[in-house]
Amino acid sequence: TSTDRTADQTVDAVVVGAGFSGLYMLHRLRDGLGLSTQVFEAGDDVGGTWYWNRYPGARCDSESYFYSFSDRLSTDLLEEWTWSERFAGQPEILRYLQHVADRFDLRRDIRFGTRVVGAAWDDDAGRWTVETDDGGRVTARFLITAVGCLSTTNLPDFPGRDSFRGDSHHTGTWPHEGVDFTGKRVAVIGTGATGVQLIPEVAQQAAHVTVFQRTPNYDIAGGNHAVTPEFDRRIKDDYRAIWARTRETAFGFPYDVADRTALSVPDDERREIFEAAWAQGGFRLGTTFNDLLLDEDANETAAEFLRGKIRERVDDPGIAEMLAPSDHPFFTKRPPLENGYYETFNRENVTLIDARRTPIEAITPAGVRTADGEYEVDSIVYATGFDAMTGTLFRLGITGRDGVALTEKWAEGPRSYLGIATHDFPNLFMLTGPQSPSVMSNMVVSIEQHVDWVADCLRHLGEQGVERIEATVEAEDAWIAHHDEVSAATLLPRANSWWVGANIPGKPRSLYPYVGGVGTYRGICDDVAAKGYEGFALTRSGVRSGV
Ligand code: NA7
């Protein structure tokens, strides 16, 4: 009832978000540790990323059999659930998460359609007070953010944006009833992983599609196909080994980076290696050599291989050149996976605009205007990405000890310990937070690792009678120093990617995800726990004990 919704409530833990991370966290806290847990979810259903991103062609770029919960959640679920495609589409992943929510009876502790708008740490009480947009207030000993990394959309502030007469949609807040593009002239702005999935689908329906590309990407063959019953059986029989691999490798995939450098093999052999990885599809191409992200010359071999693929597939050499990237090394911006993307530009009804040479100057009532003129359209699709990693954390209105806001503390960039915690914010845990592997990995593997680590930590605190846990300044400084050192050893800080915050005007530039590797990171986190939560100050009923 509405009275219940606004009543003050006291729980052990508040979890924000009901995507992969929030669902699993709720299960571990409530069913594993017996903690009373309230989840808040802005959407009207579970799913997170897979609830909101319903644009045509929306698909996961990690393979379905390992972009799903492991045996840590349940071995029965693995046997029960069968993925239909190698790379699952959004509707299927959403159905999967709905199934998980029902199967583990999670919905009763999730308040849907409710946004967290404030969370204040009360140092005297040792509790968080969480406020929601329906006027509700809940206090909790622990606050756990499970808000995903790509959940606050980036809608560029083009002059005249709201004057457009047709309909416009951002891919990250797509209408649930879908959009019918039949017979329409459509502008698509953005050619990241989202645009690359969407454009071929819209081109099949629309009368005409005008694609505004600012930066071409090194798109990799997606290689999507149906899952055969034989493959499914093989995977199910081998799941234990597969999961073990995902936990150890650099990117959380069940295959690792090859132990050889790109220039150590002759040109034709390197080409064969790239061809074989290309034929397999997906991110394997990025794991063919161990120095692609470290050495510019090595990187250029992969970059040139991919440019060659574009030239082979696009009929018009001028358009092929526009599509071929040269301003950043391969994989320093997230390479989209494509299924028929380049061939789309051979269609009569698709036009490519170089929005670097002629930037978008304004949105007009009739369409999109650049220095070259006005493009009249009926619909605009903004495939313009997200304020990643920190955007949503900042919108939660979190304040720590003495009222310090997270936005203030992180004004110059994130400052965390392990990407999980931050000094001055006791009893706050950030799942897949900045400076953790997160988006530089198979997300579900990283989510499980964080959830398991936090659940184990809370069990430990309970057993030891510890009421507060807080990262020390020293541990935070050391983690940032390590994070920066690992980042600087790669080519990644060089590109203007969302990984470094370059897509959002004014956002502090730093590499947001941790790139030391999933397996390495897990080892560090396990070690911290084994040493009694080294780097955290633990307070037992008013008695502080630092480790
Ligand atoms: P991305 O990867 O941030 O891509 C956004 C695209 O929109 C990209 O091509 C941008 O060009 C373009 N963009 C953004 N702002 C503008 C303006 N003002 N003018 C022209 N073009 C613009 O977002 P996605 O949703 O595709 O993917 C996000 C992640 O989701 C993806 O990496 C996967 O991890 C899953 P730019 O490259 O900045 O020049």
Image (cartoon, rainbow, N blue to C red):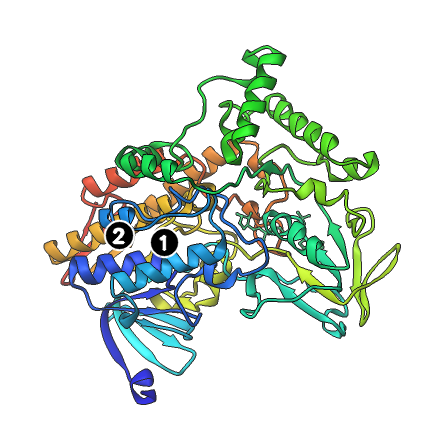
The answer to whether residue 402 is above or below residue 246 is below
**Residue at label 2?**
454
The answer to whether residue 363 is above or below residue 213 is below
- Residue shown at the point (23%, 75%) measured from the top left: 10
Q: How crowded is mark 1: few (under 14 residues within 10 Å), some or many (20 or more)?
A: many
Label of residue 431 in the image: 1
The foreground one among 360 and 420 is 360
The reply to whether residue 476 is visible in this rendering is yes
Residue kind at label 2, given as amino acid type: Val
- Residue shown at the point (56%, 46%) measured from the top left: 500
SS for callout 1: loop
Left or right: 223 with respect to 105?
right
The percent position of residue 386, horizontal first and vertical second, equals: 56, 57
In the picture, the quarter occupied by the N terminus is bottom left
Q: Residue furthest bottom?
A: 3
The foreground one among 482 and 319 is 319
Q: Distance between the residues labelled 1 and 2?
A: 9 Å
